[in-house]
């Protein structure tokens, strides 16, 4: 604490001066400044530049060397023969990625919320060594996505640990990463594995905030366990559940690293997700097309904002109804 | 307490076991295997030689074939267990293999060459840890330098993150000023921007600022994370305004209020953010890869990746160094984990 | 001054080059050469950005040689003896300089040639004859198929997931990617023939499905591990695998390099390799010249070759005696086989490294053919898509 | 309506025994209040009766039927929790209906019961609000309503008023009394506020450290506390205690020597000369007199409340003595005040703190 | 030690005016209590004086010096907050030292002041504990200590006892009074508890909806409330109000007709016959009589507290009437009780709620 106290002391006189000059609210600006400055330069400004990118064409990387093409890139993304069949689209892979991402989001978010909820309920019981068990489920959150993808690729590949285990137990090995449904399931499962601990903790915090008396009241009211869950636990956990929902949704739409390492988007293109598409178009392919990548990323951002605002809307409404 | 409370509440009731107890233990033990198993496998694999790594079926432990020095042969020879026609088992050393026939000698009696079909021999193996997977990168390949860079990036980024985010959160939670909700909206909206989306423009910015090939170029863009501001602000909202009024009455300047009152009281949330920041920064890969191209500046994750060539990946080094990179975050986590639930609960993340 | 070398490694070459450079620095104490060992991903994704920003290392080991040719430094004025370079290393200069240019940008640290490897032991166990040098792809697949059936293998053979790799057989079946205007030509019958076969083999289980199907886009996947574990009888990859196979297979079985199987017009492999080039934006071109001179000198190239088990691009070295440093008898034989196969490279294949549009074409091929293998596209739709993809890229690049 | 009988009920948490052999018989329709200092086991006892917890030993019977192992829901009791434990996400109506729905009661009957309870408790206008939108008193009534609609055998209330402010507490207390009157249901009420205990209880059970100290009507406890603990606990402000010695006993009179505060003569008590005893004087029973007999003490603080005057004093013996005088009085700190008292108002306790009875004549 | 003067102080939040033109003069060394219903602006007024907030209009002066625009830290005042606002992460000692360190006082002097305050408040044993490890009363004392060490011009206290339980509240109240005595510092004290107000205040300021209703000593307010609001607000239980009419005034007497409860004669008041007035009777001033004169009412509920008996009744006119009788009485619900009262104890208010003065003779 000594250095902290020192900092507080050393900077105090000049800042006191500032406060005298500008008043208390000037200090608000002062406190906000460093973060907003960094934020502006490294997030907001690039974001704005990205919009400019999406309206340029060519392979050049620097905006100044790029040719203005208006909305061509967007047109290219939306150029479809038949809007119901993504194979007829000029950028069929984009639409494949959109479709895959949508399915992924639905499956992953529901599985994530479900598993996190069950885990939180289990951890909320009167366990011995609760913090150990909490750590067990939280642990994968610490791993980098690349490591997560790697470990699981090893386990799931045809010559992997899982098949070895199945083989030893006398089962037919399954080609997890080559069968489309299995591979998709693996992508969902692995991303749940990697992040569920975090969301379980948020829900656990929510569960622990539910007053014990409510359960006792329900017990006095002769409520069956199932009904307690549906009518008491779940509604009272709703604020936390919504937070989890928003966060998982945002993260699910942005899914990239671990799946990229795990399946590389395969088999075929069945786990090709939007971020991978953007990454490949913008960076990885030999002739990159940053304009197209930017256009795709801006579309993705718009969808995310709409989704999040929608969910936050639900939260708000819920807040207003649930007198707290 | 009855069954109602036993599962859905928090306590295990009577000594009686019901399905919820069974399920709890099923979930915990299953979770333990599923969550820790893969990582244990990773650690275990990191001690295997390249050949053992490529092997299928994989072995549980890192094995190598036992070698024996046999008179008359310069190099040590691998030992095999051989079943001969009579069904007797013998231990022989292989001199060479020609096609499907293996020429072997009895180490005790090296004179005579015995020919064995390769189907009839199994290597005799002992557990051996390929510690060179660790030693070589750490000693020869500058991994200690990378480690230092990683520590520098992680520590600086975390400190700056905690500092700037908490300052911003303080302003956004304890002051009334015009535009406050706009700033909040802006911050929340950018929660949704993945790095890959702004990578090219960000590169231009870094490059224009001369931060290319500088650890600060890695640190700065990551520190203004909206998650942190959001989380800390939620937590600070729970600090009573009275405390701040009290400090003002106590002649404290706003700066001192921030340092001496608000920061210490935000400790649980700061701890949570610190854990996340350390994990994020430590594991950051794509961005440092883009900013850093000089060996002496590499972070561990980037250094790790140098083993990924065009056509070949040196898994044994990657795995070993992955394990090394995991250790610090696990330590930080163990150290700070007691704050996690209170921090999250307080930050409410609502 | 400082000379920074950006270098990636597939194996031990990073250590070898560091050794050689250390020796150089002892001889030239005034020049400090710093070797930046980077991930291949950096060379592929980050270096181009740097170059475009007018920055970069002084020397780099690159594979995307032609596309970025505008950024290479003309070493000519800084070399002690440009003529030595032209004589010994000149054959590949066109791979690394803009069309029509006469500069000396650097030299190939390794030549590669695609080619096959057979698991000799498996063939023996199955009692199947290893096909001879003139055997076609069909014959190879048939023979490997017999081994697969007899030894109950998962697959008969595999080809790395790479557009570069399949371009060799394509050429053998008559493909020519380069149109009259030096722009990409539409997919021709040669490519179509082999692509169809490949998809068929994948569907019939001869070709290991995992490698191609288990990824999307241009992701590179090698099938080496399946070969190392004797899960396939035949593996089509390239000369760079020799060292890798040697360490990982050890003496688990015998393997041989087979050159490239034949198609209808040739039995061609595809040459390629990594080049060490000077970067135009260097501040110390003199020193760069000195370093390059040293690294390209015959002794150094020979030592590098012998220690890395790479194929050299240096005429003098090739002509001389090369003592590859390996105990493994399979290695020497294999390397000799690859050197021999160099003679069978078809001119269409030989033209590809020096062609600017090679990589986009490879990318489109691998992306779409693997979709066809996965059953997402018919093979004919895949051909249409390949043409469209390439057209779009050409159009974008001309903006 | 029912009778609740506890026989030898004990409860331990791990090593710690929190309740010791509690015997108690609560009559049908009675309102019994548990009082006692914090941590004495009031809530634990209530929870045992409710069935939210199980005794380690002993039997709990309702209407002579052993319910010790019967689940909370099946005992037919209703509980009103300290913090009300209203379901915050349900409307008042849903809160009231929840228990009835659990019992699969027909909708029509549920509605009718809710209507009745709402009328009785005057919460009909709020039926569609959530608990968060109600005032403390309204919440209190909803909590009671939730119990009432279930038509319980008995009501259990654990400090139900402790969350209310003083004003609301008084009015809600009166409402509760009226309600008990009206329903004539058995009620067990836990509180640590004695005004509540005194005004509401038919009988008060005084607990200390897991044991029952005394059971009786409020005035029994107030007028004849069984021991020092009960004497000190019942009555506000608490009884003044002064050390004293028995001087002599004769002619049906006993003389008490107060330390440094003179002596008193009272009706003979069952104690012998020389015994050290404690004399208890209720602050309200001291009266200010101008002269003559009485105890003198120095005034240290005077609090004039308008209707009463609280006089803090110190006897010459150094004991602090509190007097609450009705109305407004003209005393000031520093003065010496003289108090008279009626010897009938005295409480005497022996060395062990047990009440000394009048001598048997 | 100082004098605080407010002149025409107003405060609005947005459209809503919370304080209206407050004029108030607080004398040096005085303990002034602000009371009033919740939301009436007590805290706002206090924060304006503290300097934590600025008035929209008006002037605040300390010792005749205009401090309206002076920062809180520079007014030399100290504040004790409702929840104490002790810094939870600092030890008691650090809490006390914080303000002094901010003023860059030398270490030695800080230590000395802390030692002195600790002695005075008897918190020396806890100096190294954190607030979380203290009881409510101890925290309260630390909060006061934090104010004391600063040697403030005046103390501002915003409901400092509201977080304590009843028992502690009483003792801490006494301590506060003693402290004020000892320091003879100016104190402004906000509370909504009138016992607190009555016992502590030199003068009480009664606020309603941002306006001052009456300022006076506790007994002035109790005995001569200026209006119905103050009458109802001061005194617990609250005053009974009965509607009445002036019958006649003659010979220095006035006759009041109570609705359905007979009539009363009192000393002449300044009102004319036929005026509708409100009669105020304090519950403590009603006395139970067996017969003769007085008001009769039907008893609806009797609460025997031992020292007092609270009788809830209803007059024949249907008005509810509360009586608090000293000691224990034998009345039961349903009986008819007869109360006598002293006409000097009566409070009369006119139609507008303003106190009616005795007629000027
Ligand atoms: N679950 C438990 N585990 C261990 N000890 C407990 C438990 N519940 C209560 N106790 C202990 O039992 C004793 C009695 O607790 P109880 O809650 O019944 O007291 P109480 O009389 O209701 O007090 P209060 O007036 O403070 O509510 C206390 O000392 C408490 O610490
Ligand atoms: N910052 C603010 N913005 C808007 N209105 C406010 C603000 N602060 C107080 N008010 C309003 O001003 C009025 C007076 O508030 P104040 O806190 O002074 O009341 P109080 O008398 O202290 O009440 P309580 O006894 O409940 O503490 C209230 O109606 C309150 O809602
Ligand atoms: O969660 P975010 O968007 O604040 O980002 C946090 C880290 O920067 C991710 O690496
Ligand atoms: Mg309790
Ligand atoms: Mg207030």
Image (tube, coloured by chain):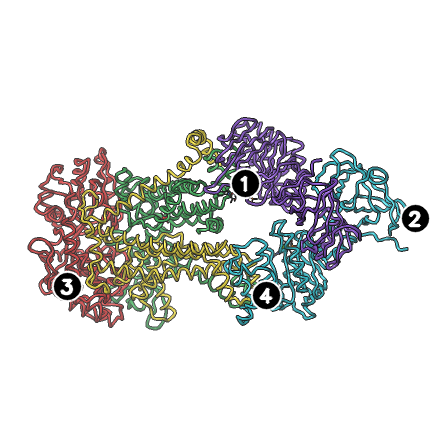
Chain colours: A yellow, B green, C red, D cyan, E purple
Q: Which residue is mark 3?
A: C261
Mark 3 vs mark 4: tell me if same chain.
no
| Residue A289 position within the rendered picture, expressed as x and y whole percent measured from the top left | 21, 51
| Location of residue D230 with respect to B218 vertically, above or below | below
Circle 2: element type: strand
The residues tagged by marks 3 and 2 sit, at their Cα atoms, a distance apart of: 134 Å
Question: Does the image show residue B94?
Answer: yes
Q: Which residue is mark 1?
A: E210
Spatial CA distance of label 1 from label 3 is 99 Å
Q: How far from the left and from the top, in percent, is residue A196?
A: 41, 57
Contact, CB < 8 Å: mark 1 with mark 3? no
Instruction: Please tell me if label 4 and label 1 are on a single chain.
Output: no
Earlier in the chain: of badge 4 and badge 2, it is 4
For disc 2, the marked residue is D250
Determine whether the beta carbon of the residue marked 1 sits less than 8 angstroms from the nearest atom of ligand 2: yes
In screen coordinates, is B20 left or right of D12?
left
B179 left or right of C264 in image? right
Q: How far separated are the C-alphas under marks 4 and 1?
A: 41 Å
Give me the chain letter of mark 1.
E
Per the image, label 4 sits on a secondary structure element best described as helix
Residue D116: mark in rendering: 4
Disc 1 crowd, CA 10 A, few/some/many (<14, 14-19, 20+): many
Q: Nearer the viewer, mark 1 or mark 2?
A: 1
Q: Name the subunit of mark 4.
A: D
Residue C226 in view in this figure: no
């Amino acid at each position: 604490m000594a250095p902290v106290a020192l900092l507080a002391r050393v900077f105090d006189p000049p800042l006191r001066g500032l406060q005298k000059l500008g008043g208390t609210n000037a200090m608000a600006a002062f406190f906000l400044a460093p973060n907003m400055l960094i934020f502006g330069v490294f997030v907001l400004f690039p974001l704005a530049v990205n919009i400019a990118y999406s309206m340029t064409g060519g392979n050049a990387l620097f905006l100044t060397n790029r040719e203005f093409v208006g909305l061509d890139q967007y047109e290219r993304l939306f150029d479809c023969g038949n809007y119901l069949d993504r194979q007829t689209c000029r950028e069929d892979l984009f639409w494949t990625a959109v479709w895959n991402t949508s399915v992924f989001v639905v499956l992953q978010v529901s599985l994530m919320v479900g598993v996190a909820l069950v885990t939180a309920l289990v951890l909320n019981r009167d366990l011995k060594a609760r913090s150990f068990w909490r750590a067990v489920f939280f642990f994968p959150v610490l791993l980098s996505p690349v490591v997560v993808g790697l470990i699981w690729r090893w386990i799931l590949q045809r010559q992997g640990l899982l098949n070895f285990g199945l083989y030893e137990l006398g089962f037919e090995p399954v080609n997890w990463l080559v069968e489309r449904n299995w591979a998709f399931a693996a992508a969902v499962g692995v991303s749940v594995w990697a992040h569920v601990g975090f969301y379980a903790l948020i829900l656990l915090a929510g569960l622990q905030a539910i007053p014990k008396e409510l359960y006792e009241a329900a017990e006095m009211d002769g409520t069956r366990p199932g009904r307690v869950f549906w009518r008491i636990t779940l509604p009272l956990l709703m604020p936390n559940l919504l937070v989890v929902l928003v966060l998982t949704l945002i993260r699910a739409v942005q899914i990239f690293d671990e799946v990229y390492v795990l399946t590389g988007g395969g088999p075929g293109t069945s786990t090709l997700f939007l971020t991978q598409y953007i990454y490949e178009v913008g960076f990885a392919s030999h002739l990159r097309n940053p304009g197209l990548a930017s256009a795709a990323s801006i579309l993705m951002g718009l969808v995310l904002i709409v989704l999040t605002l929608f969910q936050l809307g639900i939260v708000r409404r819920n807040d207003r109804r649930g007198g707290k | 307490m009855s069954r109602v409370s036993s599962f859905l509440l928090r306590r295990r009731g009577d000594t009686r076991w019901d399905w919820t107890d069974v399920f709890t233990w099923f979930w915990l033990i299953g979770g333990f295997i599923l969550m820790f198993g893969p990582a244990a496998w990773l650690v275990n694999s990191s001690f295997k030689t390249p050949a053992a790594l490529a092997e299928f079926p994989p072995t549980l432990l890192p094995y190598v074939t036992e070698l024996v020095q046999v008179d008359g042969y310069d190099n040590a020879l691998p030992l095999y267990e051989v079943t001969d026609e009579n069904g007797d088992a013998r231990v022989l050393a292989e001199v060479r293999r020609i096609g499907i026939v293996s020429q072997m000698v009895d180490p005790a009696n090296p004179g005579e060459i015995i020919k064995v079909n390769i189907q009839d021999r199994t290597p005799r193996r002992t557990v051996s840890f390929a510690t060179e997977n660790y030693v070589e990168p750490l000693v020869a390949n500058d991994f200690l330098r990378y480690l230092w860079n990683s520590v520098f990036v992680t520590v600086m980024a975390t400190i700056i993150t905690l500092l700037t985010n908490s300052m911003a959160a303080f302003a956004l939670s304890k002051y009334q000023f015009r535009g406050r909700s706009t700033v909040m909206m802006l911050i929340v909206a950018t929660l949704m921007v993945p790095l890959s989306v702004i990578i090219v423009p960000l590169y231009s910015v870094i490059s224009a600022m001369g931060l290319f090939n500088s650890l600060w170029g890695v640190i700065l863009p990551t520190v203004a994370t909206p998650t942190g501001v959001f989380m800390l602000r939620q937590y600070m909202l729970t600090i009573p305004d009275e405390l701040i009024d009290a400090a003002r009455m106590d002649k404290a300047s706003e700066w001192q209020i921030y340092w001496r009152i608000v920061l210490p009281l935000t400790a649980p949330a700061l701890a949570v953010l610190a854990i996340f920041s350390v994990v994020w920064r430590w594991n950051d890969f794509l961005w440092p890869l883009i900013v850093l191209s000089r060996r002496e500046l590499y972070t561990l994750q980037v250094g790790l990746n140098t083993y990924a060539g065009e056509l070949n990946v040196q898994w044994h080094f990657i795995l070993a160094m992955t394990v090394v990179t995991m250790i610090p975050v696990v330590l930080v986590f163990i150290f700070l984990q007691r704050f996690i639930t209170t921090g999250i609960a307080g930050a409410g993340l609502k | 001054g400082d000379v920074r070398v950006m270098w990636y490694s597939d194996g031990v070459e990073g250590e070898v080059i560091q050794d050689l450079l250390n020796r150089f620095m002892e001889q030239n104490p005034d020049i400090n050469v710093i070797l930046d060992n980077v991930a291949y991903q950096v060379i592929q994704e980050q270096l181009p950005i740097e170059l475009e920003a007018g920055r970069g290392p002084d020397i780099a080991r690159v594979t995307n040689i032609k596309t970025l040719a505008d950024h290479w430094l003309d070493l000519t004025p800084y070399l002690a003896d440009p003529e030595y370079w032209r004589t010994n290393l000149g054959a590949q200069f066109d791979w690394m300089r803009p069309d029509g240019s006469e500069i000396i940008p650097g030299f190939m640290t390794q030549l590669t040639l695609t080619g096959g490897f057979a698991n000799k032991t498996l063939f023996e166990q199955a009692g199947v004859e290893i096909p001879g040098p003139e055997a076609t792809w069909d014959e190879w697949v048939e023979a490997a198929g017999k081994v697969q059936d007899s030894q109950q293998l998962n697959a008969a053979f595999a080809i790395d997931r790479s557009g570069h790799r399949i371009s060799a057989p394509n050429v053998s079946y008559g493909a020519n990617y380069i149109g009259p205007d030096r722009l990409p030509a539409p997919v021709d019958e040669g490519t179509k023939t082999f692509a169809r076969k490949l998809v068929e083999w994948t569907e019939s289980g001869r070709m290991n499905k995992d490698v191609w199907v288990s990824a999307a886009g241009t992701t590179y996947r090698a099938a080496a591990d399946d070969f190392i574990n004797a899960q396939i009888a035949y593996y089509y990859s390239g000369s760079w695998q020799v060292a890798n196979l040697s360490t990982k297979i050890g003496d688990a079985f015998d393997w041989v390099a087979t050159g490239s199987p034949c198609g209808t017009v040739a039995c061609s492999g595809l040459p390629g390799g990594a080049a060490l080039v000077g970067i135009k934006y260097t501040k110390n071109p003199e020193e760069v010249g000195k370093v390059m001179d040293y690294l390209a000198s015959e002794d150094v190239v020979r030592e590098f070759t012998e220690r890395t088990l790479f194929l050299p691009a240096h005429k003098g070295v090739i002509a001389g005696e090369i003592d590859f440093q390996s105990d493994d008898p399979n290695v020497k034989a294999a390397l000799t086989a690859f050197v021999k196969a160099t003679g069978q490279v078809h001119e269409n294949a030989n033209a590809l490294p020096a062609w600017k549009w090679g990589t986009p074409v490879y990318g489109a091929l691998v992306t779409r053919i693997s979709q066809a293998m996965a059953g997402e596209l018919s093979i004919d739709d895949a051909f249409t898509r390949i043409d469209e993809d390439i057209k779009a890229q050409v159009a974008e690049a001309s903006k | 309506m029912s009778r609740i009988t506890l026989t030898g009920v004990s409860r331990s948490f791990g090593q710690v025994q929190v309740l010791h052999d509690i015997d108690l018989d609560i009559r049908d329709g009675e309102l019994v209040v548990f009082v006692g200092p914090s941590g004495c086991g009031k809530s634990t006892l209530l929870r045992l009766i409710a069935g939210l917890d199980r005794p380690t030993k002993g039997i709990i019977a309702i209407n002579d039927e052993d319910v010790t192992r019967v689940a909370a829901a099946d005992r037919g009791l209703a509980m009103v929790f300290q913090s009300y434990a209203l379901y915050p996400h349900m409307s008042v109506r849903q809160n009231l209906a929840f228990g009835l729905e659990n019992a699969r009661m027909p909708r029509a009957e549920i509605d009718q019961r809710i209507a009745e309870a709402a009328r009785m408790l005057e919460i009909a206008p709020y039926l569609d609000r959530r608990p968060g939108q109600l005032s403390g008193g309204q919440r209190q009534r909803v909590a009671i309503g939730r119990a009432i609609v279930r038509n319980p055998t008995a009501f259990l209330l654990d400090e139900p008023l402790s969350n209310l402010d003083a004003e609301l507490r008084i009015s809600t207390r009166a409402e509760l009394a009226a309600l008990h009157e009206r329903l004539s249901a058995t009620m067990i009420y836990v509180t640590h506020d004695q005004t509540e205990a005194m005004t509401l209880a038919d009988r008060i059970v005084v607990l200390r450290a897991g044991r029952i100290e005394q059971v009786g009507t409020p005035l029994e406890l107030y007028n004849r506390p069984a021991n020092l603990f009960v004497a000190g606990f019942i009555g506000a402000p608490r009884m003044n205690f002064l050390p004293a010695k028995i001087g002599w006993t004769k002619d049906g009179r006993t003389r008490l020597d107060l330390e440094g505060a003179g002596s008193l003569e009272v009706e003979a008590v069952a104690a012998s000369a020389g015994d050290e005893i404690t004399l208890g004087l209720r602050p309200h029973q001291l009266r200010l007199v101008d002269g003559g007999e009485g105890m003198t003490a120095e005034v240290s603080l005077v609090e004039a409340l308008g209707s009463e005057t609280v006089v803090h004093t110190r006897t010459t013996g150094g004991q602090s003595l509190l007097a609450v005088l009705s109305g407004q009085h003209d005393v000031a700190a520093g003065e010496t005040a003289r108090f008279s008292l009626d010897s009938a108002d005295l409480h005497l306790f022996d060395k062990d703190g047990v009440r000394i009875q009048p001598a048997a004549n």
